[in-house]
Image (cartoon, rainbow, N blue to C red):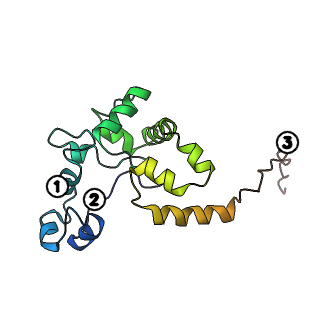
Amino acid sequence: MRTLEENLSYSAKRMTEVWSKRYPTIASAKPYANNPAMLAEKVYGGRLGNNKPGDGWAFRGSGILQTTGRDNFEEIENDTGVPVVSQPDLLRTFPGALKAATIFWKNRNINARADRNDATGVCKAVNGGTTGLADQRAWLAKTEKIWPDSAAPRFSTKRATTPPPQSQPK
């Protein structure tokens, strides 16, 4: 949850792996390699509500859940009043990044899927498909070791006390 802006600085080879349908060959990917703004326009332009020149770059993955596309930014703005359509960088900083994530999570009822450890359902709700599913399953496996389903959180009922100040030597 440290990355608040999608890194679109890909090599041509990596683009053929990530977007194999758009870039079936290295030659087709080369013009967009290490050119994040141009790549964003190519992969996000004309979809996700991105209908104006520059929308692909302006509405690239942003925030904790990597909210992508004008339509999703408009949803965040409508639900929060935060002007992220005119100021998309607000989703690339706090508190906008957190607000966007909570709205997206709530509006898509992702918590119910997460409570069932349904990594596929969460992945589809967040990404619209299963891109990144293997990584999400790996993170789920790590968290299950820390917070097993059978473990109920235990909170101390003792009130924290501040130790008395140490006397200073004279």
Q: Secondary structure at mark 2?
A: loop
Q: Secondary structure at mark 3?
A: loop
In primary-sequence order, the first of circles 2 and 1 is 2
In primary-sequence order, the first of circles 3 and 1 is 1
Pick whichever, 5 or 117, lies toward us.
Answer: 117
Residue shown at the point (27%, 32%) measured from the top left:
86
- Tell me the distance, in whole angstroms, between the alpha carbons under discs 3 and 1: 56 Å
- Nearer to us: label 3 or label 1: 1
Residue 65 visible in the shown view: no
Residue placed under numbered mark 1 in the picture: 38
Type of amino acid under label 3: Arg
Residue 52: % across, % down: 16, 38
Q: Residues within 10 Å of mark 3 (few under 14, many from 20)?
A: few
Residue placed under numbered mark 3 in the picture: 159
The answer to whether residue 3 is left or right of residue 146 is left
Q: Are marks 2 and 1 in contact (CB under 8 Å)?
A: no
Residue placed under numbered mark 2 in the picture: 8
Type of amino acid under label 2: Leu
The answer to whether residue 66 is left or right of residue 152 is left
Residue 61: % across, % down: 34, 49
Which of the 4 image quarters holds residue 67?
top left
Residue 162: % across, % down: 82, 45
- Tell me the distance, in whole angstroms, between the alpha carbons under discs 2 and 3: 49 Å
Residue shown at the point (44%, 51%) measured from the top left:
124
Q: Secondary structure at mark 1?
A: helix
Q: Are marks 2 and 3 in contact (CB under 8 Å)?
A: no
